Image (spheres, rainbow, N blue to C red):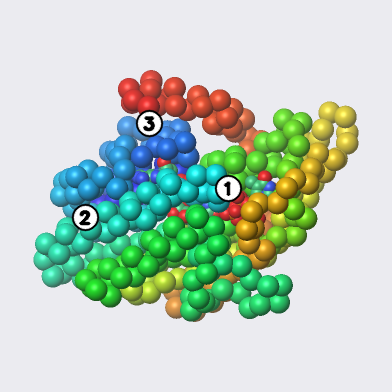
Amino acid sequence: MTLLVTGGAGFIGSNFVLEWAAQSDETIINLDKLTYAGNLENLSSLQGQSKHVFIQGDIGDAACVSALLAQYRPRAVLNFAAESHVDRSIHGPGEFIQTNIQGTFQLLECVRAYWGALDSDAQAAFRLLHVSTDEVYGSLGKTDPAFTENHRYEPNSPYSASKAASDHLVRAYHHTYGLPVLTTNCSNNYGPYHFPEKLIPLMIVNAQAGKALPVYGDGQQIRDWLYVLDHCSAIRRVLEAGRPGETYNIGGWNEKPNLEIVHTVCSLLDELKPRADGKPYQEQISYVTDRPGHDRRYAIDASKIERELGWKPAETFASGIRKTVCWYLDHPQWVANVQSGAYRDWLNQQYGSTP
Ligand code: NAD
Ligand code: TYD
């Protein structure tokens, strides 16, 4: 049995692949374009293991995807590949449209052709799992109820609009062609291998480097936070038992304003790696111009996945954030390589190519 995972060298994808390999002998074919966000160093512990096959390629390259499907005949495709950073989507939306919409469309077309040619048992067992975000639902007011799966799609950034479009395409391939799809909409993840352009790893890394901790606007924007390995366990559960055509919201029941997140990171660093001058890291906080169109609040109602599939997060925010800060303190070389771009040189050495 084989799975095709796309985007498996990114933050969530690499955590998923590592967890899967630790728990199963089923082979993973990992298709990743290796954009700036893809880092094979995350997967170095799997090197030499035949149950992980890495292919550098684009989900939008139909010839490549079709060839992989024909060669490896996966029982499921899990689509993690995306451009994922809201700020980058504001500066340059083009790549988001290309990968998140066009790429997902090409992937769906290839999967539809592959699935259509399977025998009826294999067709019934096959799944395409599309990994998406809570940001497709738009922004909530302070007292609004959390997003359920029935919430209207109201995306506000080029990133969330492109993810919303991909979700709609996935839905349409189920309704029109009968493709057995599953969609998950998850809240903000944090944990190991998170690229330090996103809030939590940026704060951990900047704090230690003595740099400013940039808080957008008043820092009172609210996100729901989920430890990445809890997201991975939810995806495994949806793959195993989710009903085709359904969507599942995944969240940690951890709504927190950004400023509280930054304060928590600072306090943990004060405890685990105090500043040389003995002053608190909070002194490095700097309020900067707000993100244009910044969504004020996201909150996930994860009761459907809990009720129907029996999934619950294992980590509280307190336990997950402590693990995360410790991981970054224990992996200074990973951070240094990402920041210097050295992982690209490492790629060259290991694989004779750079993206
Ligand atoms: P990431 O940016 O860390 O990783 C994305 C990966 O996809 C990278 O390895 C990149 O090289 C690869 N990729 C990009 N374009 C590609 C293409 N055209 N073909 C093949 N590979 C390509 O993102 P992430 O945080 O790991 O997010 C993974 C998925 O989960 C995304 O679909 C994202 O929308 C979704 N998601 C993320 C979060 C979060 O908090 N990070 C929350 C909910 C959902
Ligand atoms: P981010 O990690 O980019 O995730 P997303 O935009 O997908 O939610 O940002 C999380 C929140 O933190 C978001 O409200 C923007 C805010 N933020 C800052 O205040 N400062 C920063 O430097 C970054 C990167 C984000």
Is the residue marked by circle 1 packed among few (<14), some (14-19), or many (20+) residues within 10 Å? Answer: some
Which percent across, then down, holds residue 337?
Answer: 54, 27
User: Of label 2 and label 3, which has the lower sequence position?
Assistant: 2
Q: Are dots 2 and 3 in contact, CB under 8 Å?
A: no
- According to the picture, the residue beneath numbered tag 1 turns out to be 87
Q: What residue is drawn where x is 54% and y is 31%?
A: 338
Q: For the residue with label 1, is its CB less than 8 Å from the closest atom of ligand 2?
A: yes
Is 164 above or below relative to 49?
below
The residue where tag 3 is placed is 355
Crowd band around label 3 with a 10 angstrom C-alpha radius: few (<14), some (14–19), many (20+): few
Q: Amino acid at mark 1?
A: Asp
Rendered image: mark on residue 269: none
Query: Looking at the image, which residue is at 40% across and 63% down?
Result: 165
**Which residue corresponds to mark 2?**
110
The image position of residue 230, as x and y in percent, is 53, 59
Residue at the location (84% across, 28% down)? 276
Q: Does 305 sit left or right of 120 as displayed?
A: right
Residue in front for this viewpoint, 236 or 281: 281
Q: Earlier in the sequence, mark 1 or mark 2?
A: 1
Disc 2 from disc 3: Cα separation: 23 Å
Closer to the eye: label 3 or 1: 1
Secondary element at image label 1: helix
Residue 37 placed where, x, y %?
48, 40
Which quadrant of the structure image shows residue 256?
Answer: bottom right
Q: Secondary structure at mark 2?
A: helix
Whether residue 255 sits left or right of residue 82 in the image: it is: right
